[in-house]
Image (cartoon, helix red, strand yellow):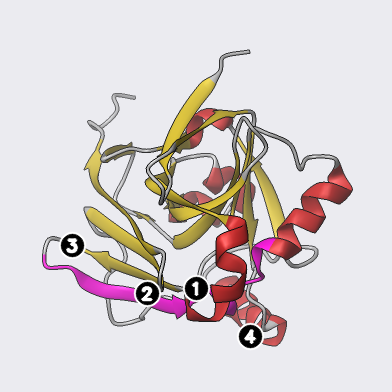
Amino acid sequence: MTEYKLQFELPDGETATVSVKNVFNAGYAGRDQDAVREHIEELAQLGVPAPATTPTMYPVAPYLAQQAQSIEVQHGKTSGEAEWALIIDDSGRELLTVACDHTDRDLETYGVAWSKNASPDVLGTKAFPLDQIKGRYDMAVLTAWVGSDRQEIQRGALTELLLPDYWLNVLEERGERNPGTILMSGTIPMAKDVDQFSDKWRVELAIPDLGTATLEYTVERMPEPIG
């Protein structure tokens, strides 16, 4: 099996390494599950199949966890999603970083799990030890901007989503709370008056007294196929 390694800078200057073995993308993971059900009904009108249960968790190929500054997509209907990522590094430390789940929106209408495997999960390069964040969940904020003019498309508190502790329990129950695991949180609502199909995404996770983790990448269209 090919091994994919990522490195993260911690607040004390230390570097954490994770040899990626399992990647999971959480979905429909808002803490207000009534609002989640309303969102599912809205997506159904766009042709996105409803999940059998919520929240969901989709396995993703390990190589899709990337710290990229540019990604390639096949067409113009893809977009990111501001998220946090839970990381268990090679030493077993549990960390949190900023992330952006880039998703194929056309493919999403055929199957959400397929769409999650069509583009990378982009992660930041700075991470925070989870035990330093637990008392700050209600103050941590996710923000996303799109385009060269940085229009704000997402902003919300970390507490709008199911918290890392919830997902750690899920991983524990599945026997997957192990070094090399990365779990993406699911996302917060998008502004409806901002075009999500942008060629640039920037996402920040700001945690008072600890700092800000940031990622930024451009979206490049692949050449048109023949045939």
Q: What element carries label 4?
A: helix
Please name the residue shown 24% across and 64% down the image: 146
Tag 4 residue: 35
* Residue type highlighted by circle 3: Gly
Which of the numbered marks, if any, corresponds to residue 147?
3
Q: Which residue is drawn at 22% across and 54% down?
A: 200
The secondary structure type at the circle numbered 2 is: strand
Q: Give the secondary structure at mark 1.
A: loop
Q: Earlier in the sequence, mark 3 or mark 1?
A: 3
Query: Do the CB atoms of the residues marked 2 and 1 lie less than 8 Å apart?
Result: yes
Q: Which of marks 2 and 4 is in front?
A: 2
**Disc 1, disc 4: CB below 8 Å?**
no
Q: Which residues are the magenta region? A: 149-164
Which quadrant of the view contains residue 8? top left
Task: Give the camera-side residue of 203 and 105.
Answer: 203
Q: Is residue 150 magenta?
A: yes
